[in-house]
Amino acid sequence: MTAKIDIINNEPKKILVGEQIVYHTDLNKISKPYGFENISFGCAVSLPELNGIKSYNKVINKHLNEINKDNWRKEYQSKVDSIKKIKIRLGEIKLCD
């Protein structure tokens, strides 16, 4: 229900769970043209919370697939990967050996 209200209010969000390599504020710069913003939930998530997040994101994903062109996910992920590569080059992200 919350996802549908956010869609009606033109405020869809993707809820991110776990440690994020790229901050949601950086992701929002590239997600805005696709019609959503990212919200970081954190690492400690209960099963009921996780189920709610999955349900919410499922409704939002369906909406985003309807309003964006077919390959929007691939384009978006490519832009996210570019941000990660830049952060690695700048030393902001360290990869495991």
Image (cartoon, rainbow, N blue to C red):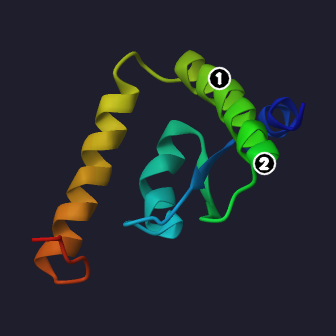
Q: How many marks?
A: 2
Q: Name the amino acid, label 1.
A: His
Image x and y of residue 68, in percent = 49, 24
Residue 84 appears at what percent x and percent y?
A: 25, 62
Camera-near label (1 vs 2) is 2
Question: Is residue 52 toward the left or the right of residue 24 in the image?
Answer: right
Mark 1 lies on a secondary structure that is: helix
Q: Amino acid at mark 2?
A: Glu
At 73% from the left and 30% from the top, the residue drawn is: 55
Q: Which mark is residue 52?
A: none
Q: Earlier in the sequence, mark 1 or mark 2?
A: 2
Relative placement, left or right, of 84 versus 96 is right
Q: Nearer the viewer, residue 65 or 42?
A: 42
> Which quadrant of the figure contains the C terminus?
bottom left
The residue at the point 75 percent across, 45 percent down is 47
Q: Which mark is residue 49?
A: 2
Image position, residue 5 (x, y; %) = 88, 35
Image height check: is 79 above or below 51? Answer: below
Pinpoint residue 50: horizontal percent, then vertical percent.
Answer: 71, 44
Q: Within 10 Å of the Cα at label 2, are there few (<14), some (14-19), or many (20+) other Cα atoms?
A: few
Q: Is residue 70 left or right of residue 38?
A: left
Residue, x 49% and y 43% (percent of image)?
33
Q: Which mark is residue 63?
A: 1
